[in-house]
Image: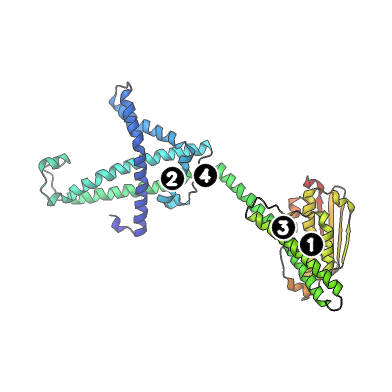
Amino acid sequence: MTLVLGPLARRTTWRRWSHLVVGGALLMPYWFLAISLIPVLPIGSNFVESVLMLLVMPGAATFVTGLVPTVRLLEGSLAKELLAGPAAALVPGSARTWESRVRAGAWFTLHLFAGVVVSGLSLAVPPFALVLLLAPAVGWDTRFMEAWGWRDYWPQWPSPFAGLVALAALLAVIVGAGALLSRLAPRFLGPSAAERLAAVQARAVKLAERNRLARELHDSVGHALSVVTLQAGAAGRVLDSDPAFAREALGAIEESARAALEDLDHVLGLLREDPSRTAPQPTLADLGRLLEQTRIAGVKLDSEVGAEVGQVPAAVSREAYRIVQEGLTNALRHAGKVPVRLRLGVVGERLEMEMSNPLGAPGGEASRHGGGRGLDGIRERVTVLRGEMSAGPEEGGWRIHVSLPLRSGT
């Protein structure tokens, strides 16, 4: 009957039958154990002994075995490979909670008992169907036919049809049992609600870390490349007329490129989960070098940094450095070498930062540096620290104001 099925369906049916037969074979040791122990007990009832021997003791033993954590891993792998369908999406893993162990024990019991039923039918039905198919054409011995329940007064012409029906019924049982187990496997062997929640939390933590690394890479390397571009252009224009400034600009380019490579190496090491790498952590203590590099690029920078910023908590100091860096990068990219005004200081319990610059000429040099997601990155950092931010055009220029609570870094 499987000839009427497509190649894929036949392959799936064969694999599911193999899964069931494996379950039937695994149940045999439990039956042998029951056959050895039950007759020793003083029960006195053949019916009770049969129930205990065939159902109760093997069922209890398989369920207890299924409580072993690794059984869930083995059964999940077996179901994923052989059952196909919904079971193909299983992620095999050991049981880590008692709820998962109980579900795995119930699945192990269901798998083994369904397997032994299908295995028994697979052994008994094909010979019976063969006898029925050949009955009209073979002169069977009367005792042989009576052994199969045949009577002389029964007509033999319907027997081939009955044989085909028996084979079709066997195939239907195999397909149905395999499809049912494939649908039930995710419920018994799939993750529990607690495991799904833990997996979602782990993915969220990993995504947040990757986003943080992306911001670090964007801010550090993006700023370095913007500054290097302007420094190289300035050095090229004054190479003959002002060699001293050109040498200073080239030195700044070398320093900026080296710092960018260090930041890139750190971030790539973290993405590779290299424990020997640590994330670059510049703070406001490094702000002087950042401002000097920006000035060497040809930007007229008017900065006023309060001395008290050195006492800012480390977490706020790190994020504030990146915010200033990204603000300068945005000015270089979108406005060019326009005057930039920076004010940074502590007011009460908050770190206040204000940066402003004139808008660049449309189609000017800055427009060739492309866009980015600088404001989004700044807003993400401010949100993490529960701060406030405003950015936008103001009186013919561009102004960014950021206010960060100092307590958010403790």
Residue 41 point in image, percent of width and height: 33, 22
Marks 4/2 in contact by CB < 8 Å: the verdict is no
Q: Which residue is mark 2?
A: 184
**Label 2 neighbour load within 10 Å: few <14, some 14-19, many 20+:** some
Q: Which residue is mark 4?
A: 191
The amino acid beneath tag 3 is Glu
Q: State the residue at coordinates (50%, 48%).
A: 91
User: Is residue 398 visible to us here?
Assistant: no
The amino acid beneath tag 4 is Pro
Q: Which residue is mark 3?
A: 216
Disc number at residue 327? 1
Tell which circle, 2 or 1, labels the residue nearer the N-terminal end: 2
Tell which circle, 1 or 4, labels the residue nearer the N-terminal end: 4
Marks 3/4 in contact by CB < 8 Å: the verdict is no
**Label 4 neighbour load within 10 Å: few <14, some 14-19, many 20+:** some
Secondary-structure class at tag 2? helix
Q: In the image shown, does 386 or 309 lie closer to the viewer? A: 309
- Please tell me whether mark 2 or mark 3 is closer to you in this view: 3
Task: Describe the colour scheme in one phrase.
Answer: rainbow
Secondary-structure class at tag 3? helix
The amino acid beneath tag 2 is Leu
Residue 285 point in image, percent of width and height: 83, 54
Tell which circle, 4 or 2, labels the residue nearer the N-terminal end: 2
**Label 3 neighbour load within 10 Å: few <14, some 14-19, many 20+:** many
Marks 3/1 in contact by CB < 8 Å: the verdict is no
Q: State the residue at coordinates (11%, 40%).
A: 143
